[in-house]
Image (tube, coloured by chain):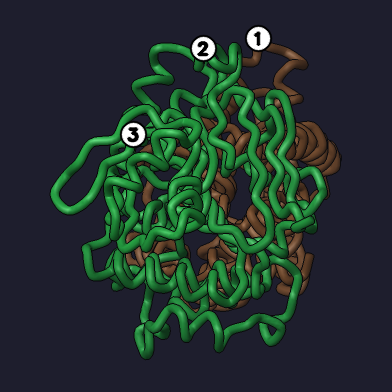
Chain colours: A green, B brown
Amino acid sequence: MAEEVVVVEDLSKRFGEVTAVDELSFTVERGQVYGLLGPNGAGKTTALRVLMGLERPSDGSARLFGTTVSPGSDELFRVGAMIEEAAFVPNLSGMTNLKLWWEAGGSPFRDADLDGALAVAGLGDALHRKVRTYSQGMKQRLGFARALLSRPELLVLDEPTNGLDPGEIREIRTLIARLTHQGATVLLSSHHLSEVEQTCTHVVVMNQGRLVAQGTVSELIGSAGSVYIEVDDPVRAETILRSLHGVTGIVAQGDGLVIDQSSGSRSDVATALVSAGLRLETIMATQRLEDAFLELLDGSERGPSPSVPGRAPEVAS
Amino acid sequence: MIALLRTEFVKAAYRTRTLIIAAILVGLPTLIVFAIKTRGNRPGDGPGRGNGEGLFRLAQQSGLLVPAAVLNVMSGFLLVIIAGLLAADAVAGDAASGNLRYVLMRPVRRVKLLAAKATVAGLLIWACVLVAALAALAVGVIAFGSHPLTVPGVRALAGTPLAGGFQLGASTILFRVAVGTAYVAFGFTALLALGTFFSTLTDTPTGAIGATVGVYIVSEILDAITQLGVVRYAFPTHYADAWQSMFTQNQYPHDMVVGIIVQLGYLVVFGTAAAVWFRRKDIRS
């Protein structure tokens, strides 16, 4: 069984009458890239703040590496984080900022993975300039460098591409991909659907503080819609798929077929066709995460799923 | 703790405002001495400030006494503002800039961080008082020399006997100036504790600074109302001028000891309140 890096269990956070997070539960296992997706005000940042020990939960718990988080927890050393915008002391250089931040934790600067972090930041000589001369993108990259100094096992990133131009967004996305290839576990929040779709393996969808759905990206997309396929024998494929559990309709479209599913996933469709000896040339979701997300939000605002009373629907494989 | 202290000290020391404060603290004594030297003390020059006016008159005999005169003038308002700024900005300033959450996302104990911030603010307040005193001493000696001091006898009230005058040697003046400087610096302990406490309550540094300085100003106003009786003895500013008796009455007043105890009381009460609050506080900035 994979190690559970983050476990959020029935987490609630209230500010007076306002409930920012309401009985949120999810688990991030080692190596996963988990996206917290939701509109502004969904409670994503609050959940991450509780996870990082900045705020205390009203109910429930947040655990890092098996230990309940509290302010100043030792487990925080294993986490690199960027919550909201990257903040620095503006009249000090980027390098001095990194050094002071690191040493505040009680470790000598020589123990930091400076070379690795700086390679990621790619700031060059600008590192020795005062931070107040940096662009937003440079600050964000310096923030990444800071988060990576401790060779973290978990990266927590809150809206990491906010305020960046398209070029900088692509750089940050590439950077996250590189880190995940190196084995880091990532938990990132975003309201940019394309960012989550392109970066994450798993998604938690939140709305108004509550969990709306969770699962892999493909499950989420597949669960709410239909699949487009192209095979060498469409007629036989239709016959096979009509008997497949969860298929509610099949419509010809161009060279292929569009299969509507009430349950199941794309892999069920692919398995059925390949097992029957058909040559599967194309299989893809006919909707993007954006469609799924909006449908889920719409559903959550109408109330909990009738299939699972009292609970937000979970998209399980 | 040493690492945290160093971190907080570098952050505070390299701020532009620190340089501006240092420039004011060096420049103002110079300006005051220049004004006294060129204009002198003339009858009818306007209202003096109790012992302060007396100290300025005496300082013309010996530049060694200029720090006492300058601290008397500055500790009433300017140093209160500076100390309030340094103390109340410690946590709230970091919170406003977003740096606080990044420090607290490290395995750093909150109370330890708060202690480091308050210690650095306290050291900077001491440094400010010391810089002002040293600048005043330097320009004072240049302007008036380092002679012994003769304090003339005074009639405190009409009908009371004449108090005898006395003489202070250069080394005695220097020692008493050092004691007075230390007392003035320590006199901001209550303000440091209040400022730190207010700083933990808000993420708006101007609010924390305003509240801290406001409490001091209210304390000074209320302290002037003698009808309040013994209540005034607990005000943080009540014993602020006690040290001046070393120069005007040739005595180490008992009030200095009481003043130190009052300051320590504020430190314990508001320091503890700040620590308790900050430990449980949600960092929302």
| Label 1 SS | helix
Q: Quarter of the image holding residue A289?
A: top left
- Residue assigned mark 3: A260
Residue B10 position within the rendered picture, expressed as x and y whole percent measured from the top left: 57, 71
Q: Which residue is mark 2?
A: A306
Q: From this view, report whether residue B267 is shown above or below residue B58.
A: above
- The residues bearing labels 2 and 3 have C-alpha atoms spaced at a distance of 20 Å
> Do callouts 2 and 1 mark residues in contact (Cβ within 8 Å)?
no
Can I make out residue B200 in this image?
A: yes
Residue at the disc numbered 1: B227
Q: Are marks 2 and 1 on the same chain?
A: no
Q: Are the residues under marks 2 and 3 on the same chain? A: yes
Asked whether residue B9 appears in the rendered view, the answer is no
Q: Quadrant of residue B160?
A: top right
Which of the 4 quarters of the picture holds residue A195?
A: bottom left
Labels 3 & 1 near each other (Cβ < 8 A) = no
Disc 2: CA contacts within 10 A as few (<14), some (14-19) or many (>=20): few
Q: Nearer the viewer, mark 2 or mark 1?
A: 2
Q: Nearer the viewer, residue A81 or A265?
A: A265
Within 10 Å of disc 3 (Cα), the crowding (few <14, some 14-19, many 20+) is many
From mark 3 to mark 1, how far is it between C-alphas?
A: 87 Å
Under mark 1, the amino acid is Gln
Q: Secondary structure at mark 2?
A: loop
Locate residue A123, reporting x and y percent: 38, 83
Where's residue B155, x and y in %?
Answer: 65, 35
